[in-house]
Image (cartoon, rainbow, N blue to C red):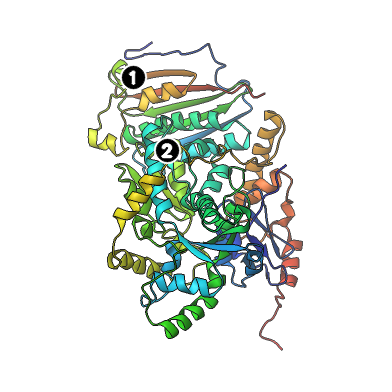
């Protein structure tokens, strides 16, 4: 592991990178593109809906995915989101090229944000970003290298098969 | 299986298959097949957009008729602020009430007290509520149905309170029955409605119980006889300042209730947003679902532009109605004090809940194992690549995306697309009588 790596594992090992994926798709995300911000999450939501995944699970996926997508839009230069649906879970990999996170432990604390109080009051900006993603997921991993970028893995179990 | 009641009626003879309705339907419930429109009753939320959009007037609101009121011994008209805004300023609410008697109502009942009761119940509910925010107003039946159909996750966020019209329905029965010694069943609680959705909410409440109201008469349907009656009454009696003892007319906050923002302002909630028109509502709810919009306590939504004053059964221009109502609030003597006293006396905390909780509407979509469903998703994605993406609507679906859904669910055939099938194009040309050389004789 390189410097600045930090991993949080919430639940058991998850099937990796799509060997048993029923469906997978990759979406590009552009840093600073606020016009299209949230579009990937919306598309993933539509796919899950069509696949008959229960609504409460979709809601968790969408909240986590949107937060992650916004992190890329707000902080990074570019990135991509890879989405996998397996017979037992939903996996989302978010990878960006950008500044990276200096202190992940700090960033994982509830309420940590570089955004001002007023911005948060209005609903803008981060603050609940990473902890919110973790809270919505069954599995969550983060790796970041300062000056290079950040990688996130989100897993949500569905057991619908 | 529930059969859904709707207020829309399609006149197949008038329908020319021009597809204006197709594009405005917020839940993609409309399809055109063989040149005629059909509406999926599971998806229809009675917004009335298609009524307004149809150039032929082929879609009509089916409300109750005057004949339906005859079964009641004592007919009470329950009137909304919207009605007061439909006439010239020289015609006062009192004139309107007198006119209502002339066309056959035994009493006229406004919603002032019930609106205040609703505000109080809402404030009490907001104070004690601990679930996810924002809470969503239950005033507009179309919004409630939109959430049941498209956002099943959020039904718990719709305030489970009876709207003022329902609270009034109960009171009207109780009050006049006691006053005149008539059985409650013989008293007709007749709502004068600005939109078809409220008629549906009376016939089939969203929560699945029965309404406290009996009938809904469309504002548009009573307008002409009412205006004639008012004019005649004014000619014979001059300007009146009196109403009959059975009538109830107070003026209060409720006059602004039919206008977007009226409810939120009355609540003095710090963090509320007010949204009208379905595409905007959908946008806001989508953003809320994702967490894009946060920290909102209350969401006031109206399906129609400007609020109930924009309903499909209004007569006057909605912007003019809004101006008139705002003027009316300024001009009329405020009697809030007396309203407050009555409300103090009548208000019973906790007794204005819906009779049962709101549930999502079950939509019969493709079923099967996740593998089968995902197979459909993949087929759809493959198929959609072959479509032009111009949403011409000639296949009978509102957009290429919806058409691809239909094909994936085997509700339609790829050959319905005119760019895929020349046969279909030929069929359509015949149907719309398109000539090869329109200039030649």
Q: Position of residue A36 (x, y in %)?
A: 42, 44
- The chain under label 1 reads A
Q: Nearer the viewer, residue A95 or B9?
A: B9
Residue sitting at 32 percent across and 18 percent down? A104
Instruction: Give the SS element for disc 1.
Output: loop
Mark 1 highlights which residue? A108
Q: Is residue A51 above or below residue B254?
A: above
Question: In the displayed structure, does residue A116 sit left or right of residue B56?
Answer: left
Instruction: Categorize mark 1 by other alpha carbons within 10 Å: few (<14), some (14-19), many (20+).
Output: many
Q: Position of residue B403 (x, y in %)?
A: 65, 51
Q: Is residue B294 above or below residue B236?
A: above
Q: Position of residue A16 (x, y in %)?
A: 55, 17
* Quadrant where the N terminus of chain A is found in the figure: top left
Quarter of the rendering containing residue A31: top left
* Quadrant where the C terminus of chain A is found in the figure: top right
Q: Is residue B353 above or below residue B170?
A: above
**Is disc 2 on the same chain as disc 1?**
no
Mark 2 highlights which residue? B349
């Amino acid at each position: 592991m390189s410097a600045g790596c930090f991993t949080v594992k919430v639940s058991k090992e998850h099937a990796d990178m799509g060997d048993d994926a029923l469906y997978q798709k990759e979406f590009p995300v552009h840093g600073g593109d606020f016009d299209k911000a949230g579009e990937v999450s919306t598309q993933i939501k539509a796919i899950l809906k069509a696949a008959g995944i229960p609504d409460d699970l979709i809601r968790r996926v969408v909240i986590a995915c949107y937060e992650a997508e916004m992190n890329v839009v707000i902080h990074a230069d570019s990135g991509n989101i890879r989405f996998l649906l397996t017979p037992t879970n939903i996996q989302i990999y978010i990878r960006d090229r950008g500044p990276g996170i200096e202190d992940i432990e700090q960033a994982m604390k509830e309420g940590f944000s570089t955004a001002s109080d007023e911005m948060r009051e209005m609903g803008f900006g981060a603050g609940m970003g990473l902890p919110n993603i973790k809270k919505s997921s069954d599995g969550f991993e983060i790796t970041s290298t300062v000056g290079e970028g950040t990688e996130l893995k989100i897993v949500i179990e569905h057991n619908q098969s | 299986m529930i059969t859904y009641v709707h207020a829309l009626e399609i006149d197949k003879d008038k329908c020319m298959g021009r597809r204006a309705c197709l594009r405005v339907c917020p839940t993609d419930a409309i399809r055109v097949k063989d040149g005629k429109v059909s509406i999926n009753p599971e998806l229809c939320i009675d917004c009335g957009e298609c009524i307004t959009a149809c150039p032929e007037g082929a879609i009509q609101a089916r409300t109750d008729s005057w004949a339906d009121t005859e079964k009641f011994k004592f007919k009470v008209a329950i009137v909304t602020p919207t009605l007061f805004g439909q006439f010239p300023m020289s015609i006062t609410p009192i004139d309107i009430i007198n006119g209502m008697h002339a066309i056959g109502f035994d009493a006229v009942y406004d919603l002032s007290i019930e609106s205040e009761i609703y505000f109080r119940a809402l404030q009490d509910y907001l104070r004690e509520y601990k679930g996810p925010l924002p809470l969503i107003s239950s005033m507009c039946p179309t919004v409630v149905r939109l959430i049941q159909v498209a956002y099943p996750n959020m039904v718990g966020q719709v305030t489970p309170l009876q709207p003022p019209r329902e609270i009034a329905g109960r009171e009207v029965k109780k009050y006049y029955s006691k006053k005149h010694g008539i059985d409650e069943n013989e008293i007709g609680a007749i709502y004068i409605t600005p939109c078809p959705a409220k008629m549906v909410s009376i016939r089939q409440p969203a929560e699945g119980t029965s309404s406290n109201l009996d009938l809904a008469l469309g504002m548009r349907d009573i307008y002409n006889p009412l205006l004639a009656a008012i004019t005649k009454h004014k000619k014979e009696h001059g300007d009146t300042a009196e109403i009959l003892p059975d009538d109830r007319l107070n003026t209060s906050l409720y006059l602004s209730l039919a206008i977007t923002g009226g409810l939120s302002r009355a609540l003095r909630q710090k963090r509320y947003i007010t949204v009208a028109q379905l595409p905007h509502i959908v946008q806001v709810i989508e953003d809320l679902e994702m967490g894009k919009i946060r920290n909102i306590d209350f969401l006031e939504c109206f399906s129609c532009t400007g609020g109930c004053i924009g309903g499909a059964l209004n007569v006057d221009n909605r912007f003019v109605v809004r101006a008139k109502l705002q003027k009316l609030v300024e001009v009329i003597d405020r009697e809030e004090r007396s309203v407050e006293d009555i409300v103090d006396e009548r208000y019973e905390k906790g007794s204005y809940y819906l009779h049962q909780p709101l549930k999502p509407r079950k939509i019969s979509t493709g079923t099967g194992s996740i593998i089968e469903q995902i197979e459909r998703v993949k087929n759809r994605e493959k198929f959609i690549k072959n479509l032009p993406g111009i949403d011409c609507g000639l296949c009978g679906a509102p957009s290429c995306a919806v058409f691809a859904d239909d094909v994936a669910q085997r509700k339609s055939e790829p050959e319905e697309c005119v760019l895929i099938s020349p046969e279909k194009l030929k069929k359509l040309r015949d149907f719309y009588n398109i000539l090869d050389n329109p200039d030649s004789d």
